[in-house]
Amino acid sequence: MSGGEARSAPRDTAAGPWRMGVETEAGRPDLREQNPWEQDRREQDRREQDRREQDRREQDRREQGAEAGRGSPWRLNTDPEAVRRDLSRLVLTLVELVRQLVERQAIRRMDQGDLSDEQVETLGLTLMRLEEAMTELCERFDVSPADLNLDLGPLGTLLPTDAP
């Protein structure tokens, strides 16, 4: 190659002094001679593009799974009325569980003789009022007391079915 031919070949002079002016046969700069930071940036861009593609595929899989799961018992019902009813049922169930635990503990303490007659009377009255309040709350939220006893599958029911 003579000097005139070398000058007529396209050069990438805007890339900076690190390019060394090395060109491939196609007239494009040789990527091996690029700035290392530019190589890092391109590698990061490629990784970011791969990550976005993977996220898109994962989202597509989730959407397909959600479509396949419509009507399944694991699907979340976002109807506001159903959410209100289910939340009130859950809260009432927890309150009833605590009420029954307190009642059993009170009976246990009475049987052991740890309480005075006045304390037994006060405790009995309080427990009766609490039970009446629970009945009133169940009526207010249109929940039967039987609805509060959640089925825990192989563990049985949450609340004991036998009276203390």
Image (cartoon, rainbow, N blue to C red):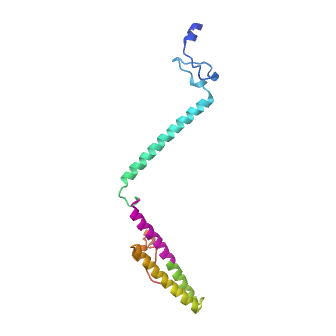
Vertical comparison of 103 with 23: above or below: below
Chain part drawn in magenta: 76-98
Front in this rendered view, residue 152 or 90: 90
Q: Is residue 36 above or below residue 57?
A: above
Q: Can residue 3 be seen in this view?
A: yes
The question of residue 84 being in magenta is answered with yes
21 horizontally vs 50: left or right: right
Q: Where is residue 48 in the image (x, y as percent from the top left)?
A: 53, 38
- Snapshot quadrant of residue 84: bottom left
- Residue occupying the point 43% across, 78% down: 136
Picture residue at 51% right of the left edge, 41% below the top: 51
Measured along the vertical axis of the image, is residue 154 above or below residue 163?
Answer: above
Residue 140, position as x, y percentages in the image: 41, 74
Instruction: Identify the residue at the far front of this view.
Output: 140
Q: Which residue is drawn at 53% across and 37% down?
A: 47
> Quick check: 5 left or right of 160?
right
**Residue 24 location (% of width, % of height):** 54, 18
Q: Residue at x 46, y 73 (%)?
A: 92
Q: Main secondary structure of the magenta part?
A: helix
